[in-house]
Structures are given as C-alpha cells and as structure tokens.
Image: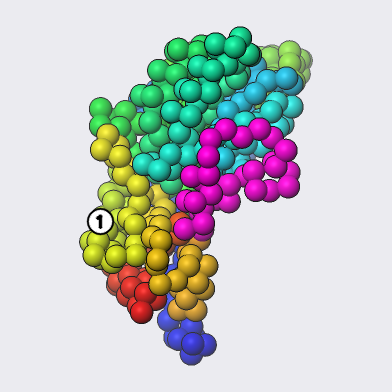
Amino acid sequence: MGSILSVVRPIVLAEPHLTESARRYLGECLDTNYVSSVGPFVGRFETAFAKTVGARRAVACASGTAAIHVAMRLLGVGAGDEVWVSSLTFVGSVNPILYQGATPVFVDSESVTWNMDPAIVDAALADRKARGIKMPKVIEVVHLLGHPADMKAFSGISERYGVPIIEDAAEALGARYDDGRFPGSIAKIGCHSFNGNKIITSGGGGMIVTNDESLGDRAKHLTMQAKLPGEAYWHDEVGYNYRLTNIAAALGLSQLESLDTFVEKKRALAARYDKAFANVPWIELPPRAAWAKPTFWLYTIRLKPGAPLERDGLMKHLASQGIQSRPIWTPLPRMEIYRGFPRVGGNVSDQIFETALSLPSSVGLTEEDQARVIDVVKAAGG
Ligand SMILES: *Cc1c(COP(=O)(O)O)cnc(C)c1O
C-alpha cells in the first residue's frame, strides 16, 4: 500500500481552481498598492455578485460566518429569541445565533434533499400558534451540499406565521430552482461563503444579499465598524470589522467570472459518478428534487442498508489508495456545546450522517483521476 502512495498523486476532496484573470486582478492590486480595504475590487465584486444572483444588493464580508452574523443583527436577533436551523449543517450556520445570545432550535432533515424539513417546521409552528406560544425570531434555511432547500414551502411558512427567513447558501452558489432563481436570493436575506473549499473562493470571504436597499445599507455599515461618514470617527452603534480586502475581492471577482464554467464542470463530474454508480446496488446517488438544479458542490453518496462495508470502512479504504473523502457534517446536537438546545423532528439527519460520504469533487478533477476514484469505490464492495 505504501508503495502505491509514493507513486500515485493523492486525490483531494475539493481544491480551488484558479484562472488566468486571478493573476491579472491580483497584479492590479499590487501595482496600485491597494492591498487592503481601499480599492475598486470590493465594489466591483459586490455589483457583479448582485447581478449574478439577481438581487438588488450584495455586501461583501470577511467570511460566510460573518455574513450570517450580520444577517442576525439586521433582523434584530438577540437574547430571548429563538432561531430555527438545520441540525445537519456546518457550525458556521449556528455560531452567529449564539454570538447574539439567542437560542438555536435544531430541526431535523427531510430525506429528499437532506435539508431542513418544512413539514416539521410547519406542524410545530401551527401547534405554537394554536397555543399562543412565542414564534421564532428567524428561520435559517441552509442549502446543503449545493442542493437547494424547498424555499417554496419555507416562503409559505414565513408568510403564514410572520417569521422572516435567512438563507445560508454558503454551499449552494450556482444552484437554481426550476424557475431559474438562485438559492440565497429568495428570502429577506441570503448569505454566501468564499472559503477555499466552496465553489468559488476569495481566499476567505462572504456576501450578504438582499432586495431591501435599507437592509443593504445597514449591512455595509455594520461590516465597517458602524462608522459615520466624515473625519470624526463617530460610530452610532456597535459594529464589526468584517470588511473584505481589495485583494480578496479581486480573487473573488476573478472566480465569479468562471462560476458558470465551474457549475458545468461539477455537473459533468456528477453525471460521470452517477453513471458509474447507477447499477451498484449498495450505493444511493445524491439527493435531487424534481424542482431543483443542484451544483453537486460535494458529490455525496449514501451507503444503503446491507452494503458490504460501512462509511468509515469505505473512507479508510479510499485513504489507503491516496483518495480523500469526508463524512457529511456531524449533526450539531451530538456535540457537547450544542447538546442542551431544543430539537424538533426525528433522526433523519443522524441516519444521513451515519451513511453519507463525499467523494472528490474539485472543479479541476481530471477524468482519469475520477475514473480511479470510481474504480476504488467499486472495488471496495468486493
Ligand atoms: C462554509 C459554510 C459557512 C461559513 O462560511 P465561512 O466562510 O467558512 O465562514 C456557513 N454555512 C455553511 C453551510 C457552510 O458550508
């Protein structure tokens, strides 16, 4: 086994795919000395991003987590409030709720898209309404692994109970609904991430999108220490230093220009995996609702009951052949720091977690390397 590792290049889960324009834009930053918070790229990135996702405003942030934190502030989330959120998500969805001293309520997944189950939320809120119990302040809908959540259902819930929605679209940039809309651009506020493993990267960064101009203005204000214009360094509320740098925005803009190409590559990659695994009886293909056009940001299979090996066994086997794979996010209520918060629903997210595995999904993954991944996965079944 050791000898294989020494001759075969390891295949990673997801790595950035840089383009020629990155070199050009970053060169402009260096040539002009605009390497920090001043310079033209932040504005250019924001404008291009808003146009791409069809939102009126986009406000750049230092990270996706920062974007979600600002979104919580914009909707007035604070102590004594609840925010309902998926239990099956990255911690960056949930920590901003705690930064605000509010209470996360963890909602189970549905099995069609693996996202938060709208039926559970609807039933629980109908019960609350009937009994006159306080509603959540916000519902935070996460679009997991590049598959849109059922925003038609969630928009209805939002209207019925008067609860605004924040969309965490950190993993779903480039995905669509069948009407052409982007996840993250439907609710009051959407949040995106440009961390290194996401479909586009700015090195690190995030974006808040909204169609509400005044929310857009306030978001910008909060990311810039809530400083008023003028020389006096006068601040009218407690803000944050959540700005994106000109360098990061330059890289982000170069990546955004290739978004369509990246999405096409991810879909082609998914189609090849689908074809190869379609007749493997122990593999369940990734979720795909009829109304959704997912990106397959991370191509994630589930091992069916009775599979010849378990998730960890398959991961180990792949690792021994120099192939990186990863379980889906550990449901947050399993961890000490989140265990004490309320939960609604059953154990669908736990079942997904125990059986799901993401396979190498880089935009730059070659067909040859992908064929090797496919062979190793299939061979693992004996
Ligand atoms: C990546 C991610 C975030 C946070 O983004 P960062 O830029 O890493 O702070 C939030 N939510 C989800 C679902 C993510 O995948």
Range covered by the magenta-colored residues: 327-355
The residue carrying pointer 1 sits among few (fewer than 14), some (14 to 19) or many (20 or more) residues within 10 Å by Cα, namely few
Asked whether 207 or 26 is in front, the reply is 207
Label 1, secondary structure: give it.
helix
Residue 2 position, x and y percent, is 52, 87
Residue 266 in the image, given as x and y percentages of width and height: 32, 52
Q: Check mark 1 vs ligand 1: CB closer than 8 Å? yes or no.
A: no
* Residue ID at (24%, 65%): 279
* In front of the other: 105 or 320: 105
166 relative to 338 in the view: left or right: left
Identify the image's colour scheme: rainbow, by chain, secondary structure or one colour.
rainbow
Horizontal side of 376 relative to 219 (left or right) equals: left
> Would you say 368 lies left or right of 183 here?
left
Asked whether the viewer can see residue 346, the reply is: yes
Q: Quadrant of residue 183?
A: top left
Tell me if residue 58 is in the magenta stretch: no
The image shows residue 242, relative to residue 30, as above or below, that is above
- Residue at point 48%, 65% (across, down): 311
Residue at point 50%, 16% (across, down)? 126
- According to the image, label 1 marks what residue? 271
Residue 364 appears anywhere in the view: no
Q: Quadrant of residue 118?
A: top left
**Which quadrant: the C terminus?**
bottom left
- Work out whether residue 106 or residue 48 is closer to the camera in this orientation and state it: 106
